[in-house]
Amino acid sequence: MADHDHHHHEHDHSELSETELRVRALETILTEKGYVEPAALDAIIQAYETKIGPHNGAQVVAKAWSDPAFKQALLDDATKAVSTLGHVSRVGDHLVAVENTPRRHNMVVCTLCSCYPWEMLGLPPVWYKAAPYRSRAVKDPRGVLADFGVSLPKETEIRVWDSTAETRFLVLPMRPEGTEGWSAQQLAELVTRDSMIGTGFPKTPGAAS
Amino acid sequence: MNGVHDMGGMDGFGKVEPEANEPVFHEKWEGRVLAMVRALGAQGAFNIDTARFYRELLPPLVYLGSSYYKKWFLGFQDVLVVKGFVGADEVKAGHALKRTKTPRRGKFTVNDVERIMIRGAFNRAAPAPAKFKAGDRVRTINFHPVTHTRLPRYVRGHVGVIERNHGCQVFPDSDAIDAGENPQWLYTVVFEGTELWGRDADPTLKVSIDAFEPYLEPA
């Protein structure tokens, strides 16, 4: 294994600036060796900063709320169903959608690392990848939900999905009341990132305006 | 391996702290790290399981004390050096110094970006029929490999029910150590909260994992 002794000293300095220098040095090496083109790295970063985010998942959820046939298709085979939506079709394989109902609430975690449906939700937030969430979600999900200011009826079943393989889980939250007749585009505005992880609910019509 | 990365059920890490209006990257270098890891992975320098294994191999205090992308950076640099794509002397110098092994698919260019925005497919042809079907009761094995595995400690030795068969997929335990893809059937297995956490568990809790067939035996 590579040597980690140098890490012991990093708190003596500004960690970020030291890390930044090391990252730059590695990029220089990889560029000089002809492994990467810096412009290609820029393009990857730009895609995650501008194109891929929770709005992708929100479109899928809103479509499921407004189109019962699509909802059924999504729950049967999310990879296939999402691939029929041209603009959010880059899901790859192994997507599973799990439906919240009055009796069951779903919550997604990756206790071992940070597995998350990037194509649907973008890159995961820091809390999703950090120890408090990864350690507690599978043992005390109601305590975790309380950290988000969210509570569920005490009889509601909580199903926690630990993403231990390449399957990626998208929570299909319950459609908010008072949205009868809304278009899919209007409904998408109500869908929050956290509601698709299971650590929050969609916005309610009043709060969204 | 029984590392600190295997966090399910541990206590003492404190509250979850969501950040309002969180940026995609908090520092510019984080984006560079993500992009470099994706690029070198796409060119065949390492597979996704190996990348995870090298992050798990970080010393526990480094793992727990580093930000997410710092861990990515450290694991990435280690894997490049150990696999011979970059020399330790080059890391020290901050420049390329010599000819080394190159990634199988050569240079990652702007023309490769589209390709990596679509997630890879992990299903493979099945070498044998599936041993389990939905509804079967199974017990997870009690094992403690010192290499990479995706069976978390908190479910080992516990009884659950098969809920879904995901098909036959690349087996991370083999793939991470360059022992081949060794495809195995993958199932969603559901456990009662009380089975995992005992009598004080939340009675409304059910937890599932995706478990490869070698992790399971009939119960």
Image: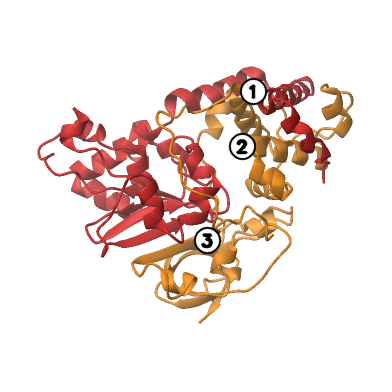
Chain colours: A red, B orange
Amino acid type indicated by mark 2? Ser
Label 2 crowd (10 A; few <14 / some 14-19 / many >=20): some
State the CA–CA distance, disc 2 to disc 1. 28 Å
Question: Residue B104, percent across and down?
Answer: 74, 37
* Numbered label attached to residue B67: 2
Q: Mark 1 belongs to which subunit?
A: B
The reply to whether dot 2 and dot 1 touch (C-beta < 8 Å) is no
* Numbered label attached to residue B88: none
Amino acid type indicated by mark 3? Gly
Is residue A123 in view?
A: yes
Is residue A198 in view?
A: no
State the CA–CA distance, disc 2 to disc 3. 21 Å
Between B131 and B68, which is closer to the camera in this rendering? B68
Q: Earlier in the sequence, mark 2 or mark 1?
A: 2
Q: Is A170 located above or below residue B90 in the figure?
A: below
Front: mark 3 or 1? 3
Label 1 crowd (10 A; few <14 / some 14-19 / many >=20): some
Question: Residue A166, percent across and down?
Answer: 52, 51
Amino acid type indicated by mark 1? Thr
Q: Which residue is mark 3?
A: B9
Q: Is B104 located above or below residue B10 in the figure?
A: above
Q: Which residue is mark 1?
A: B109
Give the structural element (helix, strand or loop) at label 3: loop
Give the structural element (helix, strand or loop) at label 1: loop
Q: Earlier in the sequence, mark 3 or mark 1?
A: 3
